Structures are given as C-alpha cells and as structure tokens.
Image (cartoon, grey):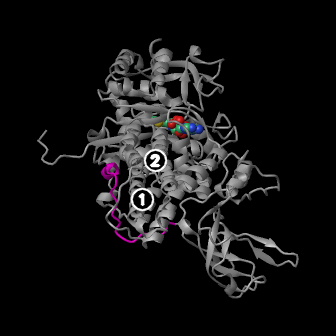
Amino acid sequence: MPDREIAQPQTYYITTPIYYTSGRPHIGHSYTTVAADAMARYRRRQGYDVMFVTGTDEHGLKVQERAAAAGLTPQTYVDGIVAEFKEIWQLLGISYDRFIRTTDPEHVAAIQEIFTMLYERGDIYLDTYEGWYCTPCESYWTETQLADGKCPDCGREVVLTQEETYFFRQSKYGERIIELYREHPEFIQPPSRMHEMLNNFLLPGLEDVAVSRTSFDWGVHVPFDEKHVVYVWVDALFNYLTVLGFPNGENPVWERYWPADVQLMGKEIVRFHTILWPALLMALDMPVPKQAFGHGWLLFRDSKMSKSVGNVVDPAILCERYGVDAIRYYLLREIPFGSDGNFSNEALVTRINADLANDLGNLVSRTTAMIARYFDGLLPEEREAAGIDDELLGLAGSLAESVEANLNELQYSQALADIWRVIGRANKYIDETTPWILARDEAQRPRLAAVLHNLAATLRQIAILLEPFMPATGPAILAALGVGDDTRQSSWASARETGLWQPAAPITAAKPLFPRLDLEAELDYMQSILEADKGQESPAPEAAEESVPAPVGIATIQYDDFAKLDLRVAVVTACDRVPKADKLLRFDLDVGSLGTRQVVSGIADSYEPGELVGRRVILVANLAKRRVRGTESEGMLLCAEAPDGSYRLLGVSDDVEAGSEVS
Ligand code: MSP
C-alpha cells in the first residue's frame, strides 16, 4: 500500500439492525435508531469519517403471508412499509449515510455470491432438516431449546418442519467464538449478555444451522439450486457488508469501514449478532465487528410493544404533538441503555415539563432576556470574577469530558444527566447571584455583566454538547446566544473551553423552546389515540390523528397541578383596542426576566385602555400561545368578576418587580 500523504480522518462505522417490514414502524424501532443517530452525530462532531447504516429486512414467510392477506404482491407490500420507515426516520432527524433494503438488486446479487463462496469453501452443504421453526421470529429451534414446547424468544407456537436444506457449518466456529469473547471482552456489551451466550449456546456446543428454505418463495434464491431461498438471517446479517459494496459491488468502500465499530441491537437478537454473524464472517476469513451492543426493550405497560397486544406507540403522533427533540430526549434519557424500561406517557410529559420547559427552557429564556434587558443585548468585555462563580465554571469545565466518557460507553442517559446537573447548577447560580437586584445598582454593573457572561458561556457549552441528542435544540440555543454556525465557538472541541462566549450580534430574549404541558389533558389525549389504534391490524396514521382528546372533567386538583401555573407580575406598557372586536383589549406587558409579551383580554367593556398603562397585573405566563380574532396572545391576565358583571384586573403594589413569581 502506498504511503498516505494526507492523514485521513479515522473511520467510524455504526449500524442499527435492519427492520422487519412485516409491520409498521413503532417507537420501539425508533429507540435503536435514535440511539445510533446520536452516536453518529457525536462521532461526526468529533471529526470521524462516519458511516451510519440502517435499512429494512424485507424477505421471509411472514412478509409473504402479510402481503397475500392484504391482496398485494410482496414487493408492493414492502415498498409501502419501507416508505413509512423512511418517513419516520426523516421526521426523527435520523442522519443515516446509507439505507439498505434486502430487496435492493445489488444486495440480492451480493448474497448470491456470498452463498456460493461459502458453499465452495465447504462451509455450506446440503442435508435434510427436521426441527422446529418459529415463523414470527424466522428462527429454527431444536427440541431441547424450546420453552414448554414454544419458541423460547417470543413464546409463540412453533411448527415441526422437515425439508431438504443447505446447512452452514456453524459448529466448526464455536471454539473460535469463545476465544474471541475471551480475548475481546468488549465484543459484547453489556457484559451480562456475553454470559448468556456462553452458557446457553456456546459452552453446550454449537450446532450447524439450516440456511435455506424450500417451503416459500419470497427471498434470495440460491443461485445454484433455484428452489431454495436463503435463510432470512443470513440474507439480513450480510447487509452490514453488502451495503458497502462487499464482495464485488460497484464503488466498494467496505475495506475502508469494515470491521464495524459498533452494531446496535435489541437484546433478543444479540444471539444472531454474536454467534451466527461472527461464524459466517470467520468462514469468509473476514474480521468480526469490534462491538455488538444489546440494548434493553422499551416496554409499554410492562410488555414489549406489539400489534397483537395493542400497545403500539406511533412515533409520528408523538413527534407531531411534542416535537422531535423532546421525543429523542425522552428515549435517550429515561432508560439506561442496556436495561429494559417502561415507555410511559406520564413520564414523557413529566420529563418535558420538568427537564425541558422548566430547567433548560428557563435557563435559556432567563439568560437571554436578562442580557437583552439589562445591556440591550451587548455585554461589556471586562468582567469581575467572584468566588461564587467557581463552582459553576468548574462544573462546566469538566462537563465535556464526562459527557464524552459516557458517550464512549453508550451511556446516553448518564451523559444527559451530566448536562442537566450543570443546567441545574446554572439555574441555581441565577437564584444565588440575583441579577435583577444587581441591576438596580449602577455600581454593580461590572458584576452583573460577569454573571451574565458566565451564564451565556456555560449555556454555549451545554448547547454544543446537546446537539447529538437534540439536533434542533442545540443549534437553536447557540443561535439565541448569537453564536454563529461553524465557528470556532460552536465546534465540538470548544465545548471544553469555559468562559468563552463572543456573540456575533446583539442578543434578544429567546422564545420558549418547549411549552409546558397539562399532564391530565395529555394523558387523556394519548389514551384516546391508543383506543383509536387498538385492534386495527394496520391502522392508517390519518385515522389515529383524527381522534379527538377526551374532555377533561372538573375535579379537585393536587398542589402539583397548581404548581404548573407560571404566574407573574407584569407591568402594562401599552394598551389599545383590538380593531373590529368590541370586547377585546390588546396589552404590551413587561414581564421582567421573561421579556415582553403581547396579551389579548376580553375586558374592553370594563376599562378604558389609557387608564391601564403602568398598572401591575398578574399574568398566566405559561399559557400556550393562541390567536384571538387574528391577534396573537401569549398568556392571560387574571381578573375577578364584579357584581355588575364587569371585570377587575388583579394586581399588586408598586414595590413588586415586573417578572416576580406569584405563588
Ligand atoms: N430484522 C431483524 C434484524 C435483522 S439485523 C441483521 C429484526 N427486526 S425488528 O424489526 O424486529 O427489530 C429491529 C430492532 O428494533 C431490534 O434491535 C429490536 O430489538 C428493536 N426493537 C423492536 N421493538 C422494540 C422495543 N419495544 N424496544 C426496544 N427495541 C425494540 O429483529
């Protein structure tokens, strides 16, 4: 090989399993893919030449049966499902580099070549198979492997099959695979899954595997014996190589990216990826992947998501209602990668409210609003440091290192917890330094500037580190801070630099990133979606979206419900009538650290607009934005009804600052 003159960036190859097309995509599938996407984004930001592959597994008896039941050809049937997968991945911001379909002609040709290579090497031979087959899992089992006579993976019925079959000499590779595990304990993660493989399969001794079928047609035909189709798992596993042009495709790049750095998968298919897959590769004298990571399941009401259980959660509905980044955040934060965990609507809404709207949202809006308000968006350069700054800056200084350490181990939840620790500390720093009090005293201007600098600089680091997890939110925060794209200040490496923040433009108060949600209403909504979806074999998304949230009854509320209201003191800076709307007044309000707001209120019968300017009123600050007679209204003013039916605005005395919380 000639010497390379220019240093090439290091490659990083990451894969998801390819998804079965016998059903529609659900949030469980999104779990693997979002995790892979976050890792791919992280590695790209670090400067790696990343290859991120996902795709669809389209052959097999199950697909053939589903297509027949729908009155479609298998190809038409899978084309429809694949389009849905691609749509969901686009919606979720999945930045895959290549998408492979096992029906791609290049893949089909490559599988035929590979099958022939293995046959010619003597590792595939013809024999008769008698054993148990689980159609939903596309898996063969021996009598002893069955659990109470059922499939040990899914618990469903198995059928006794006898047929002439090609076999792969898996048994030949048992010892080498055990050696692989011993020499590279990092090959299977988490380590518990390795013990499972050793004890259940490898140490008892591997058997040869039936790798062709004659009882159905929808698959890759064995080129030298056309009545056989290749076993779907052999067809599917090789996608990781055929997608890169192996063995003889056009523009092959497999030599550049293979072996894969990490292959992600759910725990139920670790067996295929850590026994059959390395054995097949060894038979071809190919290196094995560096790591297989078997994550846990996303459970819904304690069982795995499945159409037959009626608990499938549609990611498109979730993204539309809550936003893509909120869903990505929830998936990566809620459950430690590797463990099982429940997907719960309540936990989702709670995380959105507490972590996103409250912790992160408040930090962004308070920081930008105060810079806008106290310094017209431009902070002076010179800064006064104080001891109280050290803890925040210290935490921010070591954040990138700990996020990287956790991401290197695929501990997404831990990495996010690290980031939120700093967000929490920064919010506390605002409470401790009380910038609004510093702002009253001219002598404290340098200190006020330093506090806001520290906040903006910390937020810049947080925004960069958030980008792999939340690809829209990270850049949105940087933009709100006046940090341009692709500048040194937005580079991944600069996330290690504390105190760095030089905005390119004046800062304005950022709009709330995540609206606060009403838990009860959301739970009712999600329940109505599930009801509408239940029992439908293949529900159209439109049908689910049409369903209306169930009305919420009037009931006593808990303190927590009351605490969801963000009530603030606001000063009326302008007030006028809304044209062509007799009952409406339009207010401009100063809400202190939350910036300015426009609110429309139906009290024109009760007040003259001029008499209200300067009044301190009470604003429901976290009410979702809406349009009232064509005028935008962001919040609601609290009023009491007088005996004559007119309204009186609630207010407070003049010594209370605009923006003060009401509780
Ligand atoms: N087609 C095979 C994989 C072949 S790879 C060479 C397959 N497909 S699958 O669609 O059933 O699953 C694909 C991935 O989605 C697996 O990693 C699986 O674990 C994951 N999930 C499907 N449902 C899931 C949950 N409810 N929770 C977490 N992951 C889940 O297996």
Dot 1 or dot 2: first in sequence order is 2
Label 1 residue SS: helix
- The reply, left or right, for residue 184 in relation to residue 30 is left
Q: Quadrant of the N terminus?
A: top left
Name which residue lies at 59% across and 48% down.
Answer: 351
Residue 42: x percent and y percent? 38, 47
Tell me: residue 389, above or below residue 184.
Answer: below
Mark 2 lies on a secondary structure that is helix
Would residue 96 be visible to someone looking at this image?
no
Q: Point out the residue furthest to the right here.
A: 643
Q: How dense is the environment of label 2, judged by Cα within 10 Å: few (below 14), some, or many (20 and up)?
A: many
Region rendered in magenta: 493-510
Q: Distance between the residues labelled 1 and 2?
A: 15 Å
Which circle marks residue 451 in the picture? 1
- The question of residue 522 being in magenta is answered with no
Residue at the disc numbered 2: 422
